[in-house]
Image (cartoon, rainbow, N blue to C red):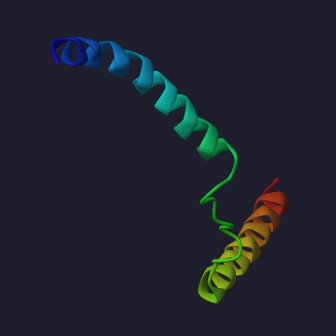
Amino acid sequence: MDTFFASVPFALVLLCPLMMLLMMWGMRSGHGHEDHAAHESTADRDELAQLREEVVALREQVGTRR
C-alpha cells in the first residue's frame, strides 16, 4: 500500500500535462464551437445596418469639408 501512495505524485506529474494536452486538442478540433452569426438576432442586424448608414453619412460629411 505504501508503494501505491508513493506512486501517486509521480502519476499526477505524468497525467496532468497529458490531460491538458487532450483538453487543448479537444478545444481546437471545434467541439462545442458555436456559430455566432447564426445566433445573431434581428435587432443586432438592424442596429448594425443603422450604424453602417451613419458611417457612410459621416464619411460624406468629412469629404465635403475638405
Instruction: Pick whichever, 49 or 45, lies toward us.
Output: 45
* Quadrant of the image occupied by residue 16: top left
> Is residue 20 toward the left or the right of residue 25 in the image?
left
Q: What is the residue that sits farthest to the bottom in this orientation?
A: 42
**Percent of width and height locating residue 58:** 73, 66
Q: Residue at x 73, y 79 (%)?
A: 49
Q: Is residue 22 above or below residue 33?
A: above
Q: What is the residue that sits farthest to the left in this orientation?
A: 2
Q: Residue at x 78, y 62 (%)?
A: 59
Q: Is residue 15 above or below residue 48?
A: above
* Quadrant of the image occupied by residue 4: top left
**Percent of width and height locating residue 43:** 60, 87
* Quadrant of the image occupied by residue 36: bottom right
Instruction: Pick whichever, 26 or 47, lies toward us.
Output: 26
Instruction: Pick whichever, 14 or 41, lies toward us.
Output: 14
**Percent of width and height locating residue 62:** 76, 59
Q: Residue at x 28, y 14 (%)?
A: 7
Q: What is the residue that sits farthest to the front in this orientation?
A: 1
Look at the image and tell me in which quarter the N terminus lies. Answer: top left
Q: Is residue 17 above or below residue 25?
A: above
Q: How many numbered marks, from 0 up?
A: 0
> Is residue 13 toward the left or the right of residue 9 in the image?
right
Q: Is residue 32 above or below residue 20?
A: below
Q: Residue at x 70, y 46 (%)?
A: 29
**Percent of width and height locating residue 34:** 64, 65
